[in-house]
Image (cartoon, rainbow, N blue to C red):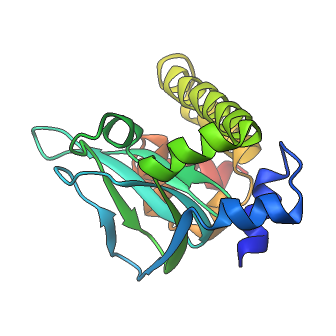
Amino acid sequence: MFEILRKQFETIVNLNDDEFEIIKSHFTEKSFAKNEYVFVEEDYVENCYFVVNGILKLVFVNDLGKEFIFSIVTENRWESDFTAYFTKSKATMYLKCVKNTHLFCLSLTNYNKLCSEFPKMQSFFHQKSTLGFITTQQRLLSFLTTNIQQRYEMMLKNQPDLHNKISKTLLASYLGVSRETLSRLYSKK
């Protein structure tokens, strides 16, 4: 299973076998069942997560109890409440499994060790976080500047198989529309 992680790294940096053996020793593995929480609001977030298989959703709940899906995470993607992770503070969101999920977990201590011991890994994480910032900004801007049709098309471009992997209700929530509006969109296609 670690080959999946190696392939992820090698999309950006080259690793020899010895380097990868050391790098993989910094990760732990965890499995979660559908509807299980990886962490909840007010937990200290000790890891960032690489999704080997499964699907998760990162959700923020406002003071009125309304849920906002920050992200839906599929295979070969990284996720956490990064503010809580990097500042060693409590989560403001929760990470919940939409399907049975297997993760590689990287503690902040091990993240820092990898970045200091392997400049390649620092470069990898820098590029991944930069891409994450860009994706998040684009998603937020899409809510301010586009209609549902355009958001849906952007989602298909960025995560082309997502609409086949999750329920229409979850997809509608992720896009910020009602299930009925999403159904109308589907009927136009």
The residue closer to the viewer here, 125 or 113, is 113
Count of marks, rendered view: 0
**Figure quadrant of residue 162:** bottom right
**Quadrant location of the N terminus?**
bottom right
Left or right placement of residue 74 versus residue 96 in this view: right
Tell me residue 138's x, y (percent): 60, 25
Image location (x, y in percent) of residue 71 = 48, 47
Residue 60 quadrant: top left
- The residue that appears at 40% across and 51% down in the rendered structure is 58
Q: Residue furthest top?
A: 145
Front position in the image: 3 or 74: 3
Residue 56 position in % (x across, y down): 47, 63
Q: Hey, which residue is sitting farthest left in the picture?
A: 64
| Residue sitting nearer the eye, 69 or 78 | 78
For residue 142, side relative to residue 162 (left or right): left
On the rendered structure, is 102 left or right of 85? Answer: right
Whether residue 18 sits left or right of residue 90 in the image: it is: right
Compared to 123, does 96 lie above or below? below
- Residue at 28% from the left image edge and 40% from the top image edge: 88
Name the residue at 14% across, 47% down.
65
Residue 62, quarter of the rendered image:
top left
